[in-house]
Every structure is written in C-alpha cells, then in structure tokens.
Image: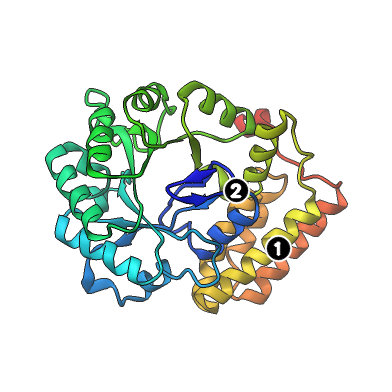
C-alpha cells in the first residue's frame, strides 16, 4: 500500500495508545503483520522534551520505517515546534492527536476536546503542516464531541484544506469514550467527502470484522488498538484473511509462549529492569486474558518481587498450557457470565 509517500506492507495500522504503543510493542506488531504503527502521544510542551518519559516515547532506535510520531497539545505554536523537534529527531510522519478522550488530556482542551473548536483545529493544522513542509502530517480524531455533535465531516474537510495527508477516525464520540459499539456511518460519510486516505478505527477484533469495516466504510485502511493487546498476531490473521478469504490456523501455545518471552525481554531492555518489571505485568495480563486458570495465575504473578520469578511464572503457566494441548484453552462465554 502506498501511504503518504511510503510503501507499506499492507493497510493495517496500529493505533496510538498511551502506555501501550511503546517501541517494543510497535516493533512486535510490525513483525506480526502491521503495515504501520503510530507512537504513543508525545507532549508538545518543550519543557518536557528532556524528561525520561518523553525521551522513551520518542525512542525509535532500530524500528522499521516509516517512523510515525503522534503529538498532542492545544497551542498552534507549541504544536508546530513539537513537529519540528520530532522531525529533527527522526520522525518521518507527524500524527496529530484529536482522538484521545482521557480527562487529563481533554481538560487542557487537547485530544478530542479540540473537536469543539473547529477554528482552533484549523489553526493547529495550518501551523503543524507549515512547520514541517517536507514531512507528511496525518490526523486522528473521533466522529464528534457527543452524539448530537458528530462534526467529523467538518473536521475532515478542514484537515484536507490544511494539507493533512491522511485521517484516521475512531467510530465513537469523545463523550462515549470506549463504551457502546463503534458506528461506521460517519466514517463512510467522511470517505465520500474528501480525497485523502481515510483509516477506520474502532471495535475491529477479528478478520471478519476487518473486512466488514473496510467494505462498509470504503476506508483505505483499518486501525487496530485494544484488540491487539496481548494478541499482536491478529495483524497477520487479518492480512491473510483479506488476501485469501481463509483463516490461518490458530497460533500454537509454544509460539505464543515464545512471542511473550521475547516481548518481555524487550520490555526489560527498553525500560530497565525495575520499570520493565512493572510494565510487563499488564502485557502478561493481556496475553493470558480469558485463559483457563489465568485469574489465579495473574493474582500470583502480581505478587512476585522480581523479574526472574516473573519470567519463571510465565514459563510455568505456558508449559502447563502446552501440556493440555497445542492450542490455548479459553474459558467459555457461559462460564464467564455465570
């Protein structure tokens, strides 16, 4: 797929997620079949450029190109400077965050809160595009501020006029956060109004759903976020299904065990032993979510004091899973509802 001047493996995108899409996760998803992975959002506040968190979020050492960095903020001049700063430090695509519904972001009128002020949206987009004229700028936003104000079509037209090269739209309003079901009618409408690529996002959890969303919206690609947490092989499953109409065999326990082991080692190396140990817990929880015996395992794992015991617990759990068969055993929906 040709995307804003870059040739991608496919039209499957990893959604930017704060605290999730760090370099280890982005690299893993690309290895597992994603065409592009957008970084977790980086602040536009220059006073924080040197902070450990910001430096980690902007760390793309060894990452497969293109490097897409998402910036967040509400001040046009600061956003322009953030774009220049990140391009100077290796970003090949700048993505603007107007989709995050988190209170700490929206309370400073950044993220999806910006959709309430279309004039400010235009000023920010003009400033960022003008600041990095040789670098593609993309935009992620939602269908609107609330159900009564689905102004994504207006935002999309403003974006195209400002020189934004592609947009990604989450099929919920800011007020919905992540509740309810994503709707795709607004995304489909936007696709008919603008000529730049449109990427559809929201509730894409299976290969069949990926095809449905592409067919329903006419979007140029799909963006996957929460569904890939603990399941990065979802990208190769979708890629194969879209190409062939057939399903890949389920990943075997031994392969998933190896993927998780490598992911944990990458986290320890990237964050350092202490922070990596803590960050690893949520990823282990995602990989084991819904598995038979996983609740007791996670409770035990979260009490462990060091990396060695954490890794040993993971190995023991997956070796036990492998003893039960070549594929993971999930708790039935009936059992979960009981």
Image coords of residue 324 (percent x, y): 86, 48
Name the foreground residue: 110 vs 167. 167
* Eye-nearest disc, 1 or 2: 2
| Residue 196 sits above or below residue 75 on the image | above
Q: CA distance from mark 1 to mark 2?
A: 32 Å
**Image quarter hosting the N terminus:** top right
Give the side of residue 188 with respect to residue 254, left or right. left
Residue 310 visible within the image: yes
Residue 91, picture quadrant:
bottom left
Name the foreground residue: 234 vs 11. 11
Image coords of residue 129 (percent x, y): 25, 53
User: Mark 1: few, some, or many residues within 10 Å (few <14, many ≥20)?
Assistant: many
User: Does the CB distance between marks 1 and 2 fall below 8 Å?
Assistant: no
Q: Helix, strand, or loop for circle 2?
A: loop
User: Residue at image x 49%, y 52%?
Assistant: 6
User: Residue at image x 49%, y 21%?
Assistant: 216
Q: Earlier in the sequence, mark 1 or mark 2?
A: 2
Residue 63, picture quadrant:
bottom right
Give the side of residue 158 with respect to residue 214, left or right. left
User: Mark 2: few, some, or many residues within 10 Å (few <14, many ≥20)?
Assistant: some
Image coords of residue 48 (percent x, y): 26, 72
Q: Give the labeled residue for mark 1.
A: 314
Q: Helix, strand, or loop for circle 1?
A: helix
| Residue 230 sits above or below residue 197 on the image | below
Q: Colour mode?
A: rainbow
Name the foreground residue: 72 vs 69. 69
Q: Give the labeled residue for mark 2.
A: 9
Image coords of residue 49 (percent x, y): 29, 73
Residue 225 visible within the image: no
């Amino acid at each position: 797929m040709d995307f804003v001047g870059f040739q991608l493996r496919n039209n499957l995108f990893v959604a930017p997620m704060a605290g999730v899409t760090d370099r280890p996760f982005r690299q893993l998803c690309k290895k597992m079949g994603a065409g592009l992975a957008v970084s977790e959002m980086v602040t536009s506040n220059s006073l924080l450029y040197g902070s450990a968190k910001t430096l980690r979020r902007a760390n793309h050492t060894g990452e497969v190109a293109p490097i897409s960095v998402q910036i967040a903020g509400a001040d046009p001049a600061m956003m322009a400077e953030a774009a220049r700063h990140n391009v100077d430090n290796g970003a090949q695509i700048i993505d603007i965050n107007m989709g995050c519904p988190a209170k700490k972001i929206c309370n400073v009128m950044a993220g999806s809160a910006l959709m309430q002020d279309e004039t400010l949206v235009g000023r920010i987009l003009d400033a960022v595009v003008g600041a990095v004229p040789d670098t593609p700028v993309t935009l992620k936003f939602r269908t609107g501020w609330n159900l009564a104000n689905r102004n994504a079509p207006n935002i999309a037209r403003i974006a195209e006029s400002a020189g934004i090269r592609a947009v990604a739209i989450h099929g919920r309003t800011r007020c919905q956060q992540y509740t309810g079901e994503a709707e795709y009618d607004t995304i489909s409408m936007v696709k008919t109004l603008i000529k730049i690529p449109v990427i559809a996002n929201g509730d894409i959890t299976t290969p069949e759903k990926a095809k449905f969303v592409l067919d329903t919206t006419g979007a140029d690609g799909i963006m996957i976020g929460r569904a890939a947490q603990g399941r990065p092989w979802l990208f190769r499953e979708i890629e194969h299904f879209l190409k062939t109409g057939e399903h890949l065999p389920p990943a075997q326990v031994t392969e998933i065990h190896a993927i998780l082991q490598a992911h944990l080692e990458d986290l320890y190396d990237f964050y350092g032993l202490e922070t990596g140990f803590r960050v690893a817990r949520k990823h282990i929880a995602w990989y084991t979510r819904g598995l038979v015996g996983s609740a007791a395992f996670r409770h035990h794992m979260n009490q462990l004091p060091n990396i060695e015991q954490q890794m040993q617990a993971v190995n023991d759990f997956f070796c036990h899973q492998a003893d039960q068969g070549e594929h993971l055993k999930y708790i039935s929906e009936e059992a979960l509802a009981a």
